[in-house]
Image (cartoon, rainbow, N blue to C red):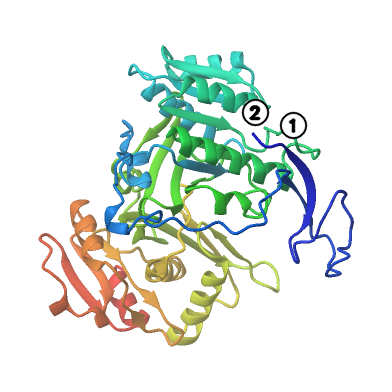
Amino acid sequence: MPKARARFVCQSCGHSQPRWEGRCPGCGEWNTFVETMVDTKRKSRGRTQPTHGQVPRLRDISPDGFTRIPIPIEEFNRVMGGGIIPGSVTLVAGDPGIGKSTLLLQISGLLAENSDPVLYVSGEESAQQIKMRAERLGIEGTNLYVLAETNLDSILEHLEQLKPRMAVIDSIQAVHLDGLTSSAGSISQVRECAATTLRLAKSIQVPVFIVGHVTKKGSIAGPRVLEHIVDTVLYLEGERFHSYRLLRGVKNRFGSTNEVGVFEMCEMGLREISNPSQVFLAGRETDAPGSAIAVTLEGTRPILVEIQALTSRTSFGLPRRTANGVDFNRLLLLIAVLSKRVGMGLSNQDVFANVVGGLRVNEPAADLALAIAIASSYRNRPVAPDLALVGEIGLSGELRAVGQIEKRLMEASKLGFGRCLLPRGVGQKRLPKVEGIQLIPVRSVAEALDVALVK
């Protein structure tokens, strides 16, 4: 194999030199040098003559080798698009302590129950720590191999020799290549380690999962370098002090990114939730003011969530606005619409909004439920217990249509809601009839308040 050496390459103009400098002498930009592995093998100066028929046509390419490996966790299969593709590299990211290592260890244990081996590499924990976690999760690990190593060259040698059914590297920021002088976790190390792992995974057709750290802002560490290299990017989201977790795909070269998996963190690890709407609505008080049910959409899955709001007279000159699980700017917008278009005196009221279960709802279709919950708390009148709410609110107080209304209505009907308040612009003639639920179209938020609040 040709030897490689480390060089510093400017990301702006491509200028290369053996040492790092703050300013590039080629283009004059600052802080653009990144350490890169450069092949020292001299390239031929002559042109290579193309061979006739060397480049295959699309119709002649065989799709063999892309048979998915199913996993006995249906929520994970949903996000991955039906299973794992051999030779693919998947990045799993999330906040510390959210459950990334637990989820991947559970998947490794399930696949290792068959005759094929599975390799779990940890650069942050010892083999004894992984053994203790596996015992807590009830994983026997007959064919699960554990390697506590941070040298990527050694890891890839074991991977090539073992050729497991699946491999996990936890985490990519903890491993390093000896050819680079920078420390583990730097941009150059992360990029080269991910690219080297990707090349080997595709050459031996072994799917590899790598764990990625996130920054304080919640983005993957390493300025989006990893996201461009890998095939699939998954985010494990959720509040650390709540038990529910959402596995969301933001990139998938082999499937859709519109799916989401719902899990619950329990004593035996992450447990999949097949009916999240029923779980999130458990313990709901139907006669309490300030509570409304929104029919949201997570990917292609409709989920009913409870949105709560509380208004109280402020003790200070400037009223407080607190949003937990909803967008803060969206909350301010809806408060302004209720004050201007409905005539509610919210200028001297503290307003608190919360999504039950630690979920985060960013969809505009939850606007109507949030506005109704605020009005219900302000007027101290509960929302009808059999009423589900769907609709986006405009600045003039009108209700606008939302997408995939049929799925939302079927989910609401399945959970026993007899009525659904939705924008009139959707049009009942365009909607298929959903058994067991009555559609109530309205034009404005003021008209919706007259229907939703119990008198």
* Pick the front one: 309 or 222: 222
Camera-side residue of 292 and 325: 325
The secondary element bearing badge 1 is classed as: loop
In the displayed structure image, the side of residue 214 where residue 286 appears, left or right: left
Q: Which class describes the residues within 10 Å of circle 1: few (<14), some (14-19), or many (20+)? A: few
CB within 8 Å, label 2 to label 1: yes
Q: Is residue 409 visible?
A: yes
User: Mark 2 and mark 1: span between their CA atoms?
Assistant: 8 Å
User: How far across and how far down the image is residue 378, in percent?
Assistant: 46, 69
Q: Nearer the viewer, residue 159 or 7?
A: 7
Give the image quarter of residue 342: bottom left
Where residue 181 appears, x then y in whole percent?
81, 38
Q: Which residue is mark 1?
A: 178
Tell me the kind of residue under disc 2.
Asp
Give the mark nearest the N terminus, 2 or 1: 2
**Amino acid type, mark 1:** Asp
Q: Give the labeled residue for mark 2.
A: 153
